[in-house]
Amino acid sequence: MTGVDRLLPIAGAAFRGSLRGSRTVALGAIAAVPTLIVVALAAANASSTQISDASLGLFGTLTLRVVMILVVLVIGVAQFRGEIEDDTLAYLTSRSVPRAVVAVGKYLGSVLACLVVLVPSALVPLAVAQAAGGSPIPSSTAFAVLATVILGTLAYDAVFLLFGLVSPSALLLGLIYGFLWEFLLSLLPGTIPRITLVYYLHALLGLSVTSGPLSGYPTVVSLGEAIAAPLGVAVAFVSLTAVLFRYEETAPLRSSA
Amino acid sequence: MSISAPRYAAGPVQLRGRLHRTLAILFRELQERAGAGTWFVMALTYATVVLTVVLGALFAPPGGASLSTFYSPFSSPAWPFLVLIVTTAVGSGAIADDLGNRSITLYLSRPIHLTDYLAAKASAVGVFIALAAIGPGVAGIVVLAGLGSISATLALSAIGAFIAVGLVTVVFFTGLAVALSSLSTKPLYAGVGIFGATFAAEISAETIGGVTGGTSIRYLGPFQDVQAAATGAFQTGASGTIDPLGASFLLLGAGILLLLGAWIRLARVEVVGE
Amino acid sequence: MTGVVDALAVTKRYGEVLGLNGFTASFGAGITGLIGPNGAGKSTLFRLLAGQLRPDAGTLSVLGQPAWSEGSFRRRVGYCPEQPAMYDWMTGKEFVVYLLRVDGYSRAEAEKRATQAIDTVGLTDAKARRVRVYSKGMRQRVKIAQGIAHDPELLLLDEPLNGVDPVGRAQLLALFTRLGRSGHHLIVSSHVLYEVERLTDQIVMISNGRALAQGDLHRIRDLIDERPHTIEITAREPRSLAKLLSGWDHVVGIEFVGPDRLTVRSRLPETFYRELPELVVREGAEISALHSSDDNLDAVFRYLSEGGR
């Protein structure tokens, strides 16, 4: 069998392992917040424009900046860190499967798991806004939102996968990256925000959405660059993870000897 | 091989009081949480806040610095993130670690009360959050007073205001961290919960409040409450939509309720072995 | 050295702690027992053999390949780790099937092999239950099942009998014996000498990260028996007792270590323990405690590590 054939069981296990038990409930609760806010607005008799604008605005402020970071952090970091802490990685690393295949399989499974949580989190508020009588949201906007979720997940998951492999403090590192680096640097003037991923995700929205709250993100990059940057980050970090995993000792640092 | 008649020789032992036992857990927890990651985020917090305070006062508009000048850290976008990261670094594992590795059994099988255990854990978390929420502001004022840039009266007032706002922040975030840490065996989930709960409440309050124009919903946002408390303590004169005193009591009350929730949760914990 | 597993001056550090300290040994065909007290370095050696850890120094080869390498040769090796952790959310069968599929087996073949392996370890009734609800003994069995399911040439079993009930132990020992007889090579670690004694005569003794002795168990025992056995006795009248014991041929030394205690050194401990009760009854000697600090494996290791070889 080829390495690709072995990807499927590893990706499948990573997917199933990521969405189980109380973790799913917790992630679901975080992902449901944007929808709940839109429902609350509808219940408060907000105007149709307000509901539509809020549902789109929440994608930029809450889903993209908070929900996506947290969901991908939990799932991405746990792929390696969870197994290293639980001491279960031995079952995979003692098998004949190349370690690079393990890394890529885990990445694909975790991306899929993230999307199962994040796609509804991004699109359901828009659907609820429509159902509650909000102004029509163009399908191109919904498509831009979906593309942003997919690209963001691909890029952030690759980053957090690496953090989980190399650092025992992956959570802290992930939070610092997700909320200090990605948030604060994107607020700075000049070209500094271009070293954040969120800049390109915002650029993608700004270039694809022509009206409404998501159209207001200024950018100097082209649509191609806005798509290529997150994809490039994803490929680079997954490759780096695969290479490092090949040379990484996978037992806990202190053994019972 | 060993054969001997059993003889129980242990006599009555005078145990030290509950305070000593609580302190033993507290000091252990302080040691545990004082890792490199915690100090790194703490250093980042001090650098950011001290700079904000000092530069804000040195470049104050004509008329010089007043108490309201020192409100600046609370309006900075960095402050909430830094406080939350410190809270996560020190609080996410406070109880989750003990639940995960089952050492909570060892604690609770000793002659200590659950209340003592929880008080010790909360105190340790609170100490670190206080270091991040109160310390940098006070340090900035001390630097300014040392440079002779502000009067002693103003310095004392500002320190008092930082302590007042810091304390309500400490109570709320300690309660949040301890409560969420008691719900999971993995610090990762507790940590993400701290961020998720705070931002979900914050953005909900802001969005719903912004659209509907309702003021009471804004009390839902923890950082909006902290900001409101700060506007009162630093006498900024800004007439916000949230009452400073009400926001302070809300944070204190929510923090205490969260701690109570953690107590109830731990009272129901059953720890089983393999 | 051209064994199934060859270790030459292998050193592994955990920070300042030495897991293995210049470990040199050769594990031959058939079943070899790796014996050592807790903390001796057994699990470190297994983790190195399984390719989880990299040696800091020395060379370690498994079936002629460097242990720290990946590739198809790993399909010839089965590993049953010591730690009880598994993917708790899978059923026992799913767990074995998953690892077989990772090894490259088709789903149908993996299902077939997993069912066989689970039957072999006696876990058929529980195969559809989640690992989370398994007892420690059941976890051991499913770990062994995943280790043997791909019919490896070499099976690494790290403390495989931990937590298994006596009946299960007998079954698993019989399984290991069967595997050994059918041409598989097994390395089985334990800190309980008699468990390994029932499996094989070939042992490697490890202590403090070093190989202390290697070869036939009975020869090593003979070497150990050359050393007098020390027994500490607490008695009401130690001097009278010493007088009686001094007449025994195999007693080579008596020392008073307290007002009511003496230590006796005997070359034949079994004879000593058989004759002592008779003496007590016959002479009415009052003995309140009897303790032998070296009547256990630790003492054997201490003896060997102190240079008794």
Image (cartoon, rainbow, N blue to C red):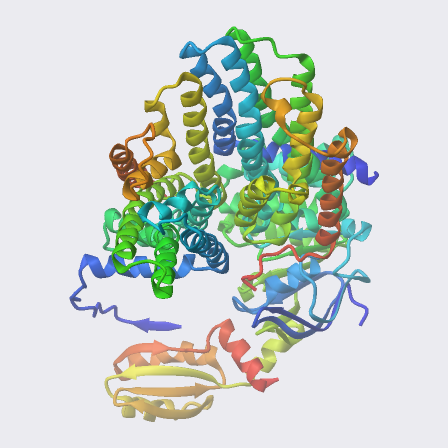
Question: Could you say which is closer to the camera, residue C115 or residue C10?
Answer: C10
Q: How many marks?
A: 0
Residue at image position (72%, 38%) is: A105
Residue at image position (71%, 45%) is: A237
Q: Quadrant of the C terminus of chain C?
A: bottom right
Quarter of the image where one finds residue C257: bottom left
Q: In the image, residue A252 lies at what x, y percent?
A: 58, 57
In the image, farthest residue toward the right: A2
Q: Quadrant of the N terminus of chain C?
A: bottom right
Q: In the image, residue C6 lies at what x, y percent?
A: 75, 68
Residue B234 horizontal side relative to residue B77, left or right: left
Quarter of the image where one finds residue A102: top right
Quarter of the image where one finds residue B216: top left
Residue C303: tell me if it is visible: yes
Question: Could you say which is closer to the camera, residue A184 or residue B260?
Answer: A184
Residue A91 horizontal side relative to residue B225, left or right: right
Q: In the image, residue C88 lies at what x, y percent?
A: 54, 39
Query: Does C26 sit above or below residue A167?
Result: below
Residue A88: tell me if it is visible: no
Residue B179 horizontal side relative to residue C302, left or right: left
Query: Does B82 sit above or below residue A230?
Result: below
Residue at image position (28%, 39%) is: B232
Question: Could you say which is closer to the camera, residue C269 or residue B120?
Answer: B120
Q: In the image, residue C48 lies at what x, y percent?
A: 68, 62
Query: Does C284 sit above or below residue B198?
Result: below
